[in-house]
Image (cartoon, rainbow, N blue to C red):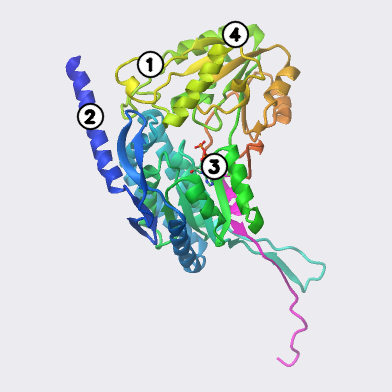
């Protein structure tokens, strides 16, 4: 027993030390003009592994000078890249996907180290789905076509083009950094644009590693990566005059700020923002699906750090206790632990700030007179887990719909349960937030399901299942959850191209020829 425990520890340590070689190598680097290089800014910040708070490397705190260098690199590359035939651009992305796939073990290790997400349940599947998304957009490059429009005059030719926009800025968060990185760059690059990405300060190294791999198949300057903070680096990037399109995933507040920064130059923005999503269990639901569905939907194994987390669980009062019993039994099986351990289901919360946020919301819950902690609700006391930002999956009830826990996006492993008796009241309650991202319903009644689909204010709606957003399935929010959809063909066509409408009147033929 002791031997197998120490063998396991050795394996985890070996994985960590080999991934650390890479994070150290990538430290203090940006990717500009096709090369990893030192940033112009001499300041940097530590990158922390949230599992044990060790420093795994550092990243440059880029400012305007680095922004300018990255945008200039992308602008120079754009003039040639836009002339490369679309299917050739796509083939390069597909070769890049093959290369990343060959090196995916290292990538998933660095992802787990950077984010604290568990390697088996999160980092490996995220790496695989990011490769899939990259490959998919490579294949879709041939779909960049305009339309012809019939005219009243058979002599007049009317058509539209689909052209690259220019240099695109992407700002990404830390919660699914690889997938969101690819969701920005792959459609943009396939469509003939060049890109500057600002990574999230909490998880910059995994993205830089994947970018380094993809860059091996692209001309220099097509893909540029800088790191740093929002005001110092993100703001000058989106405001740069050469940036003609911004794509952002993150919080509502920052999304609103970015829209404001770029409004004077009439620069289009795609925004993937937050959610406070309902998971609804009707009285006739198949509980074999609904009980694990609530847990999957809450993304507990990503510490609840997902925009789509179904953090408000509405359960019909007739099956309330039964469903809660089922969910609590399954939550007890979730193993919290070292993100690099293959046995771990749920890793660590990304940062001190997010950890504190979870604790603060729990303080509110603990001070609410009727609130009950159905599961979790306290930091683990285990020696290893107390070294990092670990918090158990937590389920609460007894909170009112108006409670901050039922209105605000916690982005931590806390879900609240609310009983309901009437479908109409439940739909009103489910819609009662500023957000409109995802919604999940479990029922065997098809007519109810169709009514729910019609009335629910959400952009990503599921019935009797709750899978994470994926390649080829268009994803985006309504209301304050965003602007535009990503992950599928329409993302590339609608958000990363511009169009000319052309009308040609050939005139009269030259009779002398
Ligand atoms: P989260 O709460 O998930 O960290 P944020 O919206 O704060 O989400 O951050 C998402 C991304 O937006 C990060 O890369 C962050 O550095 C960047 N960011 C934050 N503030 C700004 C800003 N004022 N301008 C541009 N980018 C910003």
Magenta residues, as a range?
Answer: 486-513
504 inside magenta stretch: yes
* Residue 19 at x, y percent in the picture: 28, 39
Is the residue marked 2 within 8 Å of ligand 1, measured from its CB?
no
Q: Which is closer to the viewer, label 4 or label 3?
A: 4
Q: Are marks 1 and 3 in contact (CB under 8 Å)?
A: no
Residue placed furthest toward the left: 3
> Looking at mark 3, is its residue's CB closer than 8 Å to ligand 1?
yes
Quickly name the residue at label 4.
369
* Magenta residue check for 43: no
How crowded is the residue under tag 2: few (<14 C-alpha within 10 Å), some, or many (20+)?
some
> Badge 1 is on which residue?
380
Which mark identifies residue 249?
A: 3
Looking at the rendered structure, the secondary structure element under dot 3 is strand
**Image coords of residue 310 (percent x, y):** 57, 25
For marks 1 and 2 on the same chain, the one whose residue lies earlier in the sequence: 2
Front position among marks 1 and 2: 1
Q: Earlier in the sequence, mark 4 or mark 2?
A: 2
Sequence-wise, the earlier of marks 4 and 3 is 3
Give the residue at x 74% y 88%: 510
The quadrant in which residue 219 appears is bottom left
Q: Is residue 475 visible?
A: no
Q: Relative to 320, say whether 99 is above or below.
A: below
Label 1 SS:
loop
Furthest residue in direction bottom, as rendered = 512
Mark 1 against mark 3, which lies toward the viewer? 1
Task: Give the secondary structure at mark 2.
Answer: helix
Tell me the CA gap for discs 4 and 2.
47 Å
Q: Which residue is mark 2?
A: 11
Give the residue drawn at x 59%, y 21%: 405
């Amino acid at each position: 027993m002791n031997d197998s425990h120490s063998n396991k520890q050795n394996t985890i340590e070996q994985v960590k030390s080999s991934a650390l070689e890479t994070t150290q190598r990538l430290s203090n680097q940006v990717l500009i003009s096709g090369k990893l290089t030192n940033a112009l800014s001499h300041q940097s910040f530590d990158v922390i592994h949230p599992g044990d708070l060790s420093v795994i490397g550092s990243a440059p705190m880029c400012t305007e000078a680095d922004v300018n260098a990255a945008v200039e690199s992308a602008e120079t590359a754009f003039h040639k890249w836009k002339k490369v035939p679309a299917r050739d651009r796509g083939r390069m992305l597909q070769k890049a996907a093959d290369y990343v796939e060959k090196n995916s073990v290292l990538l998933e290790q660095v992802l787990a180290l950077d984010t604290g997400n568990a390697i088996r349940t999160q980092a490996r599947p995220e790496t695989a789905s990011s490769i899939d998304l990259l490959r998919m957009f490579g294949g879709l490059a041939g779909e960049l076509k305009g339309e012809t429009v019939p005219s009243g005059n058979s002599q007049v030719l009317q058509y539209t083009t689909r052209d690259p926009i220019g240099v695109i800025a992407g700002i990404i968060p830390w919660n699914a950094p690889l997938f969101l990185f690819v969701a920005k760059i792959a459609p943009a690059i396939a469509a003939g644009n060049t890109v500057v990405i600002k990574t999230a300060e909490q998880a910059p190294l995994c993205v830089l590693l994947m970018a380094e791999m993809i860059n091996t198949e692209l001309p220099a300057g097509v893909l540029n990566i800088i790191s740093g903070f929002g005001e110092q680096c993100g703001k000058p990037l989106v405001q740069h005059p050469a940036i003609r399109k911004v794509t952002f995933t993150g919080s509502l507040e920052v999304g609103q700020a970015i829209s404001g920064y770029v409004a004077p130059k009439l620069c289009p923005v795609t925004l993937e923002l937050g959610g406070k999503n309902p998971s609804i269990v009707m009285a006739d639901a198949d509980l074999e699906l609904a009980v694990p569905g609530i847990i999957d939907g809450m993304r507990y194994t990503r510490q609840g750090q997902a925009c789509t987390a179904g953090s408000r669980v509405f359960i019909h009062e007739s099956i309330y206790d039964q469903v809660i019993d089922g969910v609590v039994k399954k939550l007890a099986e979730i193993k919290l632990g070292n993100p690099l351990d293959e046995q771990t289901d749920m890793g660590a919360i990304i940062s001190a700030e997010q950890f504190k946020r979870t604790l603060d919301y729990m303080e509110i819950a603990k001070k609410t007179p009727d609130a009950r902690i159905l599961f979790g609700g306290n930091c683990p006391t285990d020696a290893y887990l107390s070294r990092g930002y670990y918090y158990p999956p937590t389920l609460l009830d007894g909170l009112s719909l108006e409670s901050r826990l039922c209105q605000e996006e916690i982005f931590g492993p806390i879900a609240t349960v609310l009983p309901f008796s009437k479908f109409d009241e439940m739909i009103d309650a489910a819609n009662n937030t500023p957000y409109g991202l995802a919604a999940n319903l479990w029922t065997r009644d098809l007519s109810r399901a169709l009514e729910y689909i019609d009335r629910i204010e959400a952009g990503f709606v599921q019935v009797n299942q709750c899978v994470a957003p994926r390649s080829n399935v268009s994803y985006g929010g309504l209301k304050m959850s965003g602007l535009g959809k990503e992950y599928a063909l329409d993302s590339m066509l609608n958000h990363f191209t511009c169009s000319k409408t052309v009308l040609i009147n050939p005139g009269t033929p030259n009779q002398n020829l």
